[in-house]
Amino acid sequence: MRQQGWMRILAFITFSWVAFLLITIKFVKQQDNIDGDSSQRLARALEELEKLHRSNAELNALVLDLNDNPKVDHKKVLLAYMKNSKETHSNAPSEEYELLRRRIYANIKELSFYINTELNSLGKEINGVNTEHLEKIKKNFGEHYRALLSDVKNLSEVDGHAQWRKKESENLSNLVQKRLYYLQNPSDCSKAKKIVCDLNKGCGYGCQIHHVVYCFIVAYATERTLVLKSKGWRYSRGGWQDVFLPLSNTCTSPNGETVSRWPGNRKTQVITLPIIDSINPRPSFLPLALPEDIAPRLNILHGDPVVWWIGQFLKYMLRPQPITSQMLDDYSKKVGFKKPIVGVHIRRTDKVGTEAAFHKLDEYMVHVEEFYKFQELNNKIHKKRVYLATDEPKLFSEVKHKYPDYEIIGDEDISKTASISKRYSGQSLSGIITDIHFLSLSDYLVCTFSSQVCRVAYEIKNTLQSDASTLYKSLDDIYYYGGQKRRLHVAVLSHVADGPQEMDLQVGDQIAVAGNHWDGYSKGTNLRTKKNALYPTFKVIPKIETASFGNYLSVPFNAENIIDKNR
């Protein structure tokens, strides 16, 4: 990170500190005229002020540490990684082939969105339209669409690169996992630089999990051991280690007092992170950025590399304690979890009307049906199954009544514990861990990406397969990471706007993406013209943004995976 960026952060925090002090003094004076509690209020205010002062000093120490680090020749590191990849897998496909194969698949889907939207519009707008004929067209087009998708999918199975994809995915995952293990198990804990993350963000489980991922990314980027402060966690008073293996195996004392026992000199300075929403300006390594040393390999391997990258942190973080593993195994036997199966996550309660729109059950099941129709092109489906995860218990009876040909797997009791009144209980924690686990194990995922639970399941799913970036359907948002930097598209075809609602495109234009309308068009802001409007999705490709992270040169490229050996 550049020194100038960190100095801006320091200036911002210093300004906030002074402003906070002035507001506090004014507030206390006002309250002094109302009641006799001003001394206690002042004490609390000064305590908060001291916390801000410590954060300011900690960030200043981090700037000094970063300035002391020697400059790394990242081009040399990148060449070494690419050389290792080619030597290990001489049958690797070309980048052009993999990107084109995935682009064809994506554009067939975009064509389907467009055609179906237009056909539905015709049925509504034209008086006297032959609806029977229109339905026949939609049915025939659906068959063409599924056949095309199947052909493109089969390419990856017959092109001779399937084994490479599997092996490359394993090697890259092992590499990142070894780096995280190395980071979290310093040889001398007393001398290791550390970052402390408070599991105190006032939000739900998925949001809190993503908060820890953000902390872990900062730790990885700055090569600091992450220490998670989780005692008194609202989901489990005993903390993270009651459910998952501790993130740091060597830096916690027997009684859990971690921070106060560490020396305060600069080499062992402990940095406490704010929540991601409070950082301004943004460090270059925050999502959606990828490490520049592995990004080229990831771009060939995966359809949405940032999802794979986020998933690797979850893979390390969410290693279950034995009691958690046993709970999941017992549940799997209890409900008879079998494949093929589609995971359906339906979030209602407090989300609807605030963060997300209401979607009927039928809207989800349309895509479940489509998945099974696609599967039946190549395989006989004897039983169609759905794993249902929801915070609306009555949906279990509704789906069984409306779709009797499906086997519905799930637990209505888990659904009840997801209610607002029970959400932060031990039962609720077990329930949400269970739902996310089995959603991620499903063959296909239907949900709304406005829900962080759904996005966590999707991220984990992409750690279980070489590339699961096409095995989902979101009814609302595209994939995003809360607090992320912008997602960019780059125009590869020109476009002349057909009305004020669309933007002109020139080849090479970059668009900051707002979302996909699932009708053949996306919306965003053209960085050249500054116009916020629609554009045809098939005329753009995603841009992969990279940043300098820790180099981890002491972690070998091709050593065996040590994570499982040390669990």
Image: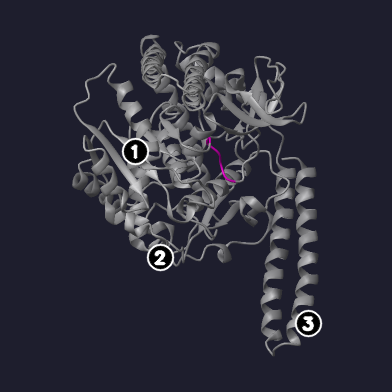
The residue beneath circle 2 is 421
Residue 335 or residue 170, whichever sits in front: 335
In this view of the protein, can residue 187 be seen by the observer? Answer: no
- Taking the spot 65% from the left edge, 61% from the top edge, the residue there is 264
Q: Is residue 338 above or below residue 189?
A: above
Magenta stretch, residue numbers: 478-482
Find numbered disc 2 in the image and state the secondary structure of the residue it sits on. helix
Label count reads 3
Of the numbered discs 2 and 1, the one sitting upstream in the chain is 1
Residue 203 or residue 312, whichever sits in front: 203
In this view of the protein, can residue 75 be seen by the observer? Answer: yes
Is the N terminus in the top left, top right, bottom left or bottom right quadrant? top right
Find numbered disc 1 in the image and state the secondary structure of the residue it sits on. strand
Identify the amino acid type marked 1: Gly
Q: Where is residue 533 in the image (x, y as percent from the top left)?
A: 68, 30
Estimate the spatial distance between the alpha carbons at disc 3 and disc 2, rounded to whole Å. 38 Å
Q: Quadrant of residue 82?
A: top right
- Taking the spot 38% from the left edge, 20% from the top edge, the residue there is 135
The crowd level at tag 1 (other Cα within 10 Å; few <14, some 14-19, many 20+) is: many
Residue most extreme to the front: 128
Find numbered disc 3 in the image and state the secondary structure of the residue it sits on. helix
Identify the amino acid type marked 2: Ser
- Circle nearer the viewer, 1 or 3: 1
Q: In this view, does 261 lie above or below 489?
A: below
Identify the amino acid type marked 3: Lys
The residue beneath circle 1 is 343
Estimate the spatial distance between the alpha carbons at disc 1 and disc 3, rounded to whole Å. 57 Å
- Taking the spot 28% from the left edge, 53% from the top edge, the residue there is 412
Determine which of the numbered discs, if any, sits on residue 92 in the image.
none
Of the numbered discs 3 and 2, the one sitting upstream in the chain is 3
What type of secondary structure mainly makes up the magenta span?
Answer: loop
Determine which of the numbered discs, if any, sits on residue 29 in the image.
3
